[in-house]
Amino acid sequence: MTTVFRRLALEAGDKIMEIYTSDDFDVRSKSDDSPVTAADEAADALITQGLKAAFPDVVLITEEQAASHRLQAPNFIIVDPLDGTKEFVQRRGDFTVNIAYVENGVPLRGVVYAPARGRLFYTDAGGASVEETGDLDKNRIGTTARMAVAMPDNGALMVVASKSHRDQATDDYIGKYNVKDMTSAGSSLKFCLVATGEADLYPRLGRTMEWDTAAGDAVLRGAGGHVVRFDNHMPLTYGKEGYDNPFFIAYAPGVALKEA
């Protein structure tokens, strides 16, 4: 399954970069006022076609088609063909292709590809997370390195937060910790920075949807990390009505979580 996810993410990344590097592209607003571009739609079409051909019996949810699909299955594939459209529109590079497989509420497999950064993260056949480097050949897996969360120092934590959705509530919560340094990143790259050990903690006190988080969540879990609800620290689950997530915290084990 991950092999197919990986190939489709790379192919979608090529489509996205064709538009990203063009002189101009149109940006429209969806019904919720979030932006959408031709890159979102081209990537969605490519990934949808590929996944339906490879897994015809598995329910498929994508961001661009979710409004017309009610989830009625415990196991499904969920896709954000271009996560971080605001980063894309502003040409800041921190956008990703996210593809995940969810089983009984848990994201077990995931691929996160950041085409403008040339970084590819995914869970392997055994569920462990790896980062692949090299030329990222679509038909041949290259050199991979096993990912593992860092052993955090609660007296000097590394924190990652959103570039486009930072607010006072997030800053207030981060202020409860002893922070060594902070970095910002767009899209699901924030999960991956915790998964690689480049950060210890990623709190999100803002609206997200399941397709925004499932692939990054799978990658972080495969690297030994956790994603929990902000309000009660219970594991974040998938397959919820409307696909809305509650606020959440992604972190490396060993971080002494603070109460909301």
Image: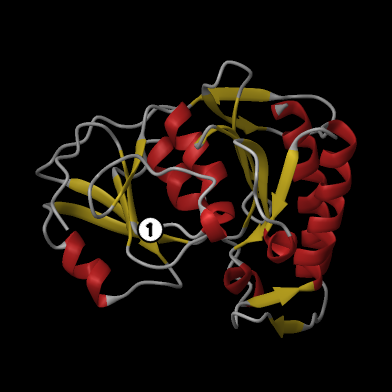
- Residue 234, image x and y in percent? 29, 41
Q: Three-letter amino acid code at disc 1?
A: Pro
**In the depicted view, which residue is nearer to us: 122 or 103?**
103
**In the depicted view, which residue is nearer to us: 133 or 105?**
105
* Residue closest to the far front: 72
- Residue 247, image x and y in percent? 34, 59
Image quadrant holding the N terminus, namely top right
Seen in the picture, residue 111 relative to 70 is either above or below; the reply is above
Residue 21 appears in the picture as rendered: no
Q: Mark 1 points at which residue?
A: 246
Q: State the residue at coordinates (65%, 78%).
A: 35
Seen in the picture, residue 211 relative to 75 is either above or below; the reply is below
Image quadrant holding the C terminus, namely bottom left
Q: State the residue at coordinates (38%, 42%).
A: 194
Q: State the residue at coordinates (59%, 53%).
A: 211
Coloring scheme of the render? secondary structure
- Mark 1: give few (<14), some (14-19) or many (20+) Cα within 10 Å: some
